[in-house]
Image (cartoon, helix red, strand yellow):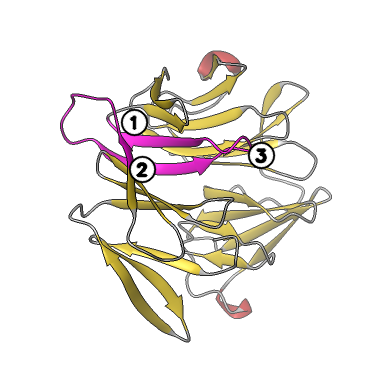
Amino acid sequence: DIAGQLWFAKAGSVGIFRDGRFETRFIVPERVVRLAAARDGGLWVGAGKRLLKSTGGKEPVLLGELSTERTGVEPSALFEDRAGGLWIGTTAGGLFHWSDAGMLAAETSHSDITSITEDREGSIWVGTEGGGLDRLRNRVLELHGSAAGLPFGTARSVCEDDAGTIWATGANGALVRRLRDAWEIVREGAGWTGARATCVAGDRAGGVWIGTYRAGLVHWRDGKFTTLGRNDGLGGENVRALLVDSKTNLWIG
């Protein structure tokens, strides 16, 4: 959260990690739960089709429910935009936006949402499981798929670096970035080994962290790539998730 407290969700239990221990603060009946920090100091909680909000670590309050009749819909990604609205990605249910106006569905190229981020222009980028990357700008959806030069249909991870460049990884392990309004595949050379990329995260210092499958952790900055592995203290060679926190620490799954 914005105070630097690390929260976790597991099988319906939601709590904090403090002094080396996991402390459960509240329990929800849904087993699939997604969390996101709220700018006002609270915590967004996506539990099944329900959207809740916890303030001060107290029991969460119900804000609304996803307007879908489909079964098996679960939250997959939560993201609060700069206007204070919350974007909710789901498995099989598409994308939703919650604000004071209520819960609204947003059209996307695929109903399975994997990741969400916002760039400096206020555009919302949405990774999908099979429909490529969607860009929502001024209430307009822009599809970035194979026709736009994207070399994959399933976008696994997306981020923006300090220069405003969007980076993304696909299910096929491809690493791409958007330069001069065109997608560029990062190919082997200039320090990049051509490893199977899994996830990306901007480090707020001009660089980008790149997780890989069986090739450790890679850092890009000023056009150069540096690889870190077990000899550098990395716990494993397969990196599944990355997060840069408010103190610029890097968390690695």
Give the CA distance from mark 1 to mark 2.
8 Å
Q: Would you call the spot at circle 2 few (<14 residues within 10 Å), some (14-19), or many (20 or more)?
A: many
Please state which of residues 121 and 227 is positioned toward the viewer in this rendering. Answer: 121
- For the N terminus, the quadrant is bottom right
Please state which of residues 160 and 180 is positioned toward the viewer in this rendering. Answer: 160
- Which residue is tagged 3? 187
What amino acid type should be assigned to the residue bearing mark 3?
A: Arg
178 w.r.t. 207: above or below: above
> Looking at the image, is mark 2 or mark 3 earlier in the sequence?
2
> Looking at the image, is mark 1 or mark 3 earlier in the sequence?
1
Q: Nearer the viewer, mark 2 or mark 3?
A: 2
Residue 11 as seen in the image, left or right of residue 218: left
111 w.r.t. 222: above or below: above
> Is residue 244 visible from the viewing direction of this image?
yes
Give the CA distance from mark 2 to mark 3.
30 Å
Q: Would you call the spot at circle 3 few (<14 residues within 10 Å), some (14-19), or many (20 or more)?
A: some
- Counting from the top left corner in percent of width and height, residue 138 is at 62, 16
**Which of the labelled discs sits on residue 76, or is there none?**
2
Judged from the image, the secondary structure of the residue bearing numbered disc 3 is loop
- Which residue is tagged 1? 112
Residue 49: which quarter of the image?
top left
What amino acid type should be assigned to the residue bearing mark 2?
A: Ser
What amino acid type should be assigned to the residue bearing mark 1?
A: Asp
Image point (60%, 60%), residue name: 2
- Counting from the top left corner in percent of width and height, residue 253 is at 46, 64
Image point (18%, 24%), residue name: 69
> Looking at the image, is mark 1 or mark 2 earlier in the sequence?
2
Image point (77%, 48%), residue name: 190
Range shown magenta: 63-92
Q: Is residue 103 magenta?
A: no
Q: Is residue 88 magenta?
A: yes
